[in-house]
Image: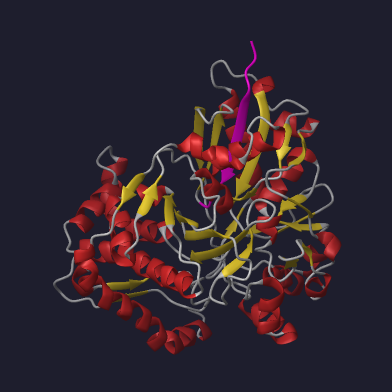
Amino acid sequence: MGQDLLLGIDIGTYESKGVLTTPQGKVIAQATIAHKLLFPRAGWAEHDPELTWWGDFCNLSKQLLATDGVSPSDIKGVGVSAIGPDVLPIDENFNPLRMGILYGVDTRAVEEIDELNAIYGEDTIFNATANTLSSQSTGPKILWIKKNEPEVYKKARWFVDATTFIVARLTSRVVVDHFSAGTMVPMYDPWKNQWSDKYCKEILDINQLPELMWSHELAGHIIESASKATGLAVGTPVSVGTIDAGAEALSVSVTQPGELMMMYGSTIFMIQVTDNDQARDKRLWAGPYLFPGTWCLLAGMATSGSLTRWFKDNFAKELVAAEEAGGENAYAVLVKEAAATPPGAEGVVVLPYFSGERTPVMDPRAKGMIFGLSLTHTRGHIFRSILEGMGHGFKQHVDLFTAIGARPHAIKSVGGGTKNAVWLQAVSDISGVPQEVAPLTFGASYGDALLAGVAVGLVSSPEEIRVWQGKPTIVQPDPSLAPTYAPLSEIYSNLYQSTKESMHKLHELGY
């Protein structure tokens, strides 16, 4: 006898995840595939779209369909999300014309940002799009392709992100949701919910952009070639989907104004829903949320899990070797070392700008820093200070949200970093705000399944995610630590301002 199931798949920075759920949110099966992030040059970050984006989707789909008692006909809806905003030129047959250029961790288009600001004016772009140009923006990266890879540019039928690419392969329809389009600065008008021809002209032909829809709408149905590659039945409905951060926010029931998602992933990403489409600031991003009539503020720090991974791989090699030999998890040992270190890391302060920085400094030329070291400090001090650096950065954002009249009333945390109790507690202690950690942490793929359910009518509304999730765990800040952390937060902010010129000089020298 058949059953109704929903398939959600998310393509992340270092791994991809998939879930099979019932329309009531019960997870029947899940699967994960690790993959590589490519750094072909300093400041560049890429994925292989064929191998990683499409390949992971196909492999996860087949793995989940191999679950006992599951057949392709049981899948009543498919939801997709992926990293973004990223840039991929494709031809008319949806074939990639180069590697996928990733989101803000890729800082190659610095000159193009300056060029577009010179053409249009920074204030003009901000007033037209609710955003300033940054390493997160896709417009400058498309312009970079136009200038540096003209043959690729000439062959491109569309410029898409990873989600659009996968959905096109599945359905032969090239669509993007409004939330994702809002990150495609300066080409999208967030108030009219349409592409802006005025701001496309210097970058590409407006017809090279995908069709605009909402994330929970139906994009199309599985075509025959996709059925062969994925194991899904021909005709299975596919929702439009979204960027991973949007699906992740939905997965922890961020749907109402004042609710903010704090995503501890390879980077930190924040999404706060607001009922005010004028709540914006040049140090943040803004645009429509996942559903009609919604608005959100977005923020992101360029390194997070990628920085803890860098530290582990370079300064804890013996722990990695011990883990590979069957010993304790290397991260777990580092967390113990951090836990044994006093809050404040005895004066060590880390600027986590190891791949430039996104919000609030919007500086792709920014450099990472470990400040305040002495001969008394240990590896545990430095690892703790890395975690606390994210807390100082988060506090900057909470202060900024508050200053523009959009202080969040609920912080909902999600991602791999939520498994690290020291990190969670430090972020709350430094920022002074509690965090809610949802009981189900399947991530963006879980939100994808819900979007698929709404698209096919098996889930009544996105608000059903609250029923799916249940009661969260609360991480409360320790007010007794405020005197320890407040001066360190001030030092954190001052460090960037006082060394910015030197950082930029290093960038000019090619470092």
Q: Image point 34% across, 77% down: which residue?
A: 492
Using the rendered image of the protein, determine whether residue 251 is visible from the camera's viewpoint: yes
What segment carries the magenta color?
Answer: 1-13
- Above or below, 314 against 42 in this view is above
Query: Does residue 487 show up magenta in the picture?
Result: no
* 186 over 293 or under it: above or below: below
Q: Residue at x 66, y 29 (%)?
A: 458
Residue 304 in percent (x, y) is at 42, 60
* x, y percent for residue 334: 25, 54
Q: Residue at x 40, y 69 (%)?
A: 393
State the quadrant of the N terminus.
top right
State the image coordinates of residue 72 (x, y, percent, origin top left): 67, 22
State the residue at coordinates (26%, 44%): 322
The answer to whether residue 343 of the structure is visible from this angle is no
| Image location of residue 287, percent across then percent down | 64, 64
Rendered position, 435 above or below 7: below
Please say whether residue 12 is one of the residues in the magenta stretch: yes
Observer-nearest residue: 392 or 38? Answer: 392
Q: Residue furthest left?
A: 376
State how the image is colored.
secondary structure
Q: Quick one: 157 or 349, which is closer to the camera? A: 349
Left or right of residue 53: residue 397: left
97, above or below 75, in the image: below
The answer to whether residue 324 is left or right of residue 92 is: left
